[in-house]
Image (spheres, helix red, strand yellow):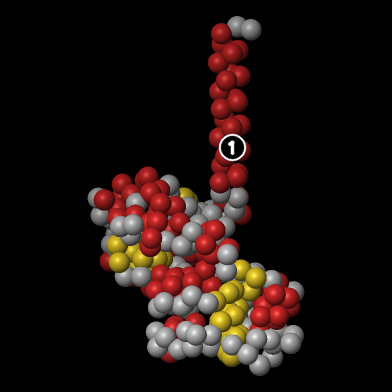
């Protein structure tokens, strides 16, 4: 094989390899062809030079648990989201806007950037690696429960730790039969898609009430708390508060109420 041919083949192999990694690492980019993206390294360079406004588009509980330092919290769910971001762009014409959420499987960073593109704002980007990747690469520019992330091994909850708290529906019902157990539904009225069969008497305490009015008060720490949300995601952040307030006896319904009810409706 001639040298030129070998070079061409090598380049093609490299391109194919990069394409495969691209597809695996960011599976949803293809669904948002009009959205621009920014890497962790490029975002950090802009961050250090004060050339970017970083916007966290997640819920308040997620932001309060962990966020990028100096990021601005503007939930995508807000009706005023586009106007709010448009004002930030107007006030900071020389800066780019980067949206982030919970990493490569979270669509909110894409959807936020898409909203702004559709509103005519081109200088916006999705940081789709999200807070999980940022916290690994730049812990000192990450805030966890109001504190700088100086010791990730102690401040962050690992996936293996979280999984130890997950139980299926049958196990949850069995544990609920114990007189020392309390079943708690932390969904709000928008998320709720119905009561769980056999657990119709579960306490309904949406997170915005459960955290300050129950956990912060350190109520029923001698009980076993059996907690479920809609799809099993919000309890990941709730675990930080449970640990912070000294709770030890608690479990989460794996994949939430949606797994049991086989539906996910929003009112």
Residue 263 visible in the displayed image: no
Secondary structure of the residue carrying numbered label 1: helix
The residue pinned by badge 1 equals 19
Q: Is residue 235 left or right of residue 87?
A: right
* Quadrant assignment, res 31: bottom right
In depth, the one of 244 and 138 nearer the eye is 244
In depth, the one of 234 and 4 nearer the eye is 234
Q: At which x and y percent is residue 81?
A: 44, 73
Residue at image x 49%, y 59%?
158
* Quadrant assignment, res 181: bottom right
* Quadrant assignment, res 94: bottom left
Q: Is residue 245 above or below residue 113?
A: below
Q: Residues within 10 Å of mark 1 (few under 14, many from 20)?
A: few
Q: Is residue 120 above or below residue 182?
A: above
Q: Quadrant of the N terminus?
A: top right
Residue 101 visible in the displayed image: yes
Q: Is residue 175 left or right of residue 48?
A: right
Q: Is residue 187 above or below residue 74?
A: below
In depth, the one of 247 and 53 nearer the eye is 247
Residue at image x 34%, y 51%?
138
In depth, the one of 262 and 128 nearer the eye is 262
């Amino acid at each position: 094989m001639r040298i030129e041919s070998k070079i061409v083949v090598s380049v093609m192999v490299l391109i194919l390899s990069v394409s495969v990694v691209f597809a695996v690492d960011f599976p949803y980019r293809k669904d948002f062809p009009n959205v621009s993206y920014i890497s962790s390294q490029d975002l950090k360079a802009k961050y250090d030079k004060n050339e970017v406004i970083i916007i966290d588009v997640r819920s308040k509980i997620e932001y309060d648990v962990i966020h990028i330092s100096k990021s601005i919290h503007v939930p995508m769910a807000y009706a005023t989201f586009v106007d709010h971001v448009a004002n930030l762009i107007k006030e900071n014409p020389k800066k780019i806007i980067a949206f982030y959420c919970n990493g490569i499987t979270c669509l909110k960073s894409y959807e936020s950037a898409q909203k702004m593109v559709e509103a005519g704002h081109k200088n916006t980007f999705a940081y789709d690696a999200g807070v999980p990747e940022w916290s690994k690469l730049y812990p000192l520019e990450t805030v966890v429960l109001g504190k700088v992330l100086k010791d990730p091994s102690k401040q962050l909850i690992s996936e293996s730790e979280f999984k130890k708290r997950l139980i299926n529906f049958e196990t949850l019902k069995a544990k609920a039969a114990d007189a020392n157990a309390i079943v708690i539904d932390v969904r709000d009225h928008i998320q709720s898609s119905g009561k769980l069969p056999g657990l119709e008497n579960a306490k309904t305490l949406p997170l915005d009430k459960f955290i300050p009015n129950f956990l912060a008060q350190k109520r029923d720490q001698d009980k076993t708390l059996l907690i479920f949300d809609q799809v099993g995601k919000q309890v990941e952040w709730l675990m930080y508060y449970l640990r912070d307030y000294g709770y030890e006896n608690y479990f989460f319904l794996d994949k939430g109420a949606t797994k049991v009810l086989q539906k996910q409706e929003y009112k």
